[in-house]
């Protein structure tokens, strides 16, 4: 997915919230190398899949970037949402956007996602977004930590974006593939954890 065009000389990208209380709001984010905001049509498909689940959910976005998925979840009624990113600029922008939206149930942290999952006490989330930088081998490691360190509710939903078909990347055996599609060169999929197969 190509980066959005720079906006003016400040090199800002722009995203639009599709649904929920902030529907049609446009927000900016740093137009940084490697930042791939999930396109509107993919986001719309994902949140159609999550429609019965997202309201009241506890949401974790491990590689938040522009915050497109994170902000969409909050707009659609997520009860609590935590976003992590290793880019200070991305986190600063997300904090500014939460302030602009007068959102008080979103938290953002400037941190390495894998280190955070490994070192912090696990907290069960209902929905997790996984859109890591490509070609760095981060997806499988993040999935393993989510599963083994107590970060997932019994029937959590996990969304992945990847440069290869996710069913070939060695994801936990307790995750059942719900939906999978491809947009351009990117695979995106929604998984559900099944406690019956854990252990």
Image (cartoon, rainbow, N blue to C red):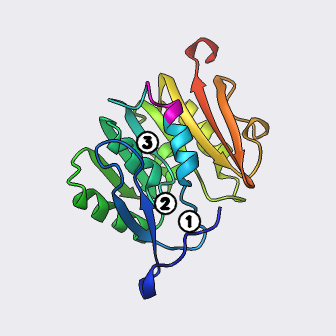
The residue indicated by pointer 1 is 35
| Circles 1 and 2: CB atoms closer than 8 Å | yes
Q: Is residue 192 above or below residue 78?
A: above
State which region is magenta.
Answer: 48-52
Count residues near mark 1 (Cα–Cα under 10 Å), then give few for <14, some for 14-19, many for 20+: many
Q: Nearer the viewer, residue 179 or 119?
A: 179
The residue indicated by pointer 2 is: 65
Q: Which residue is mark 3?
A: 60
Task: Residue at 61%, 30% (x, y): give it.
Answer: 191
Q: Quadrant of the N terminus?
A: bottom right
Residue at the outermost right position: 168
Residue 75 shown left or right of residue 35 in the figure: left
Give 166 or 187, whichever is nearer the viewer.
Answer: 187
Prevailing SS of the magenta stretch: loop
Q: Position of residue 196 (x, y in %)?
A: 60, 11
Q: Please indicate whether residue 156 sits to the left or right of residue 136 in the image.
A: left
Q: Is residue 194 above or below residue 141?
A: above
The Cα–Cα distance between marks 3 and 1, rounded to whole angstroms, is 18 Å
Q: Quadrant of residue 159?
A: top right
């Amino acid at each position: 997915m190509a980066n959005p065009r720079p906006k003016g000389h400040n090199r800002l990208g722009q995203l639009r919230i599709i649904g929920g209380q902030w529907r049609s709001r446009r927000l900016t984010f740093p137009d940084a190398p490697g930042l791939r905001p999930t396109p509107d049509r993919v986001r719309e498909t994902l949140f159609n899949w999550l429609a019965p689940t997202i309201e009241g959910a506890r949401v974790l976005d491990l590689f938040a970037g522009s915050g497109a998925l994170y902000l969409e979840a909050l707009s659609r009624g997520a009860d609590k949402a935590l976003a992590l990113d290793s880019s200070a600029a991305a986190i600063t922008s997300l904090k500014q956007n939460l302030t602009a939206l007068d959102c008080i149930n979103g938290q953002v942290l400037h941190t390495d996602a894998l280190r955070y999952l490994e070192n912090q006490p696990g907290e069960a989330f209902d929905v997790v977004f996984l859109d890591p930088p490509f070609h760095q081998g981060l997806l499988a490691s993040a999935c393993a930590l989510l599963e083994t360190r107590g970060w997932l509710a019994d029937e959590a939903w996990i969304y992945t974006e990847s440069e290869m078909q996710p069913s070939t990347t060695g994801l936990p055996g307790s995750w059942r593939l719900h939906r999978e599609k491809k947009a351009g060169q990117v695979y995106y999929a929604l998984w559900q954890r099944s406690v019956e197969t854990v252990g």
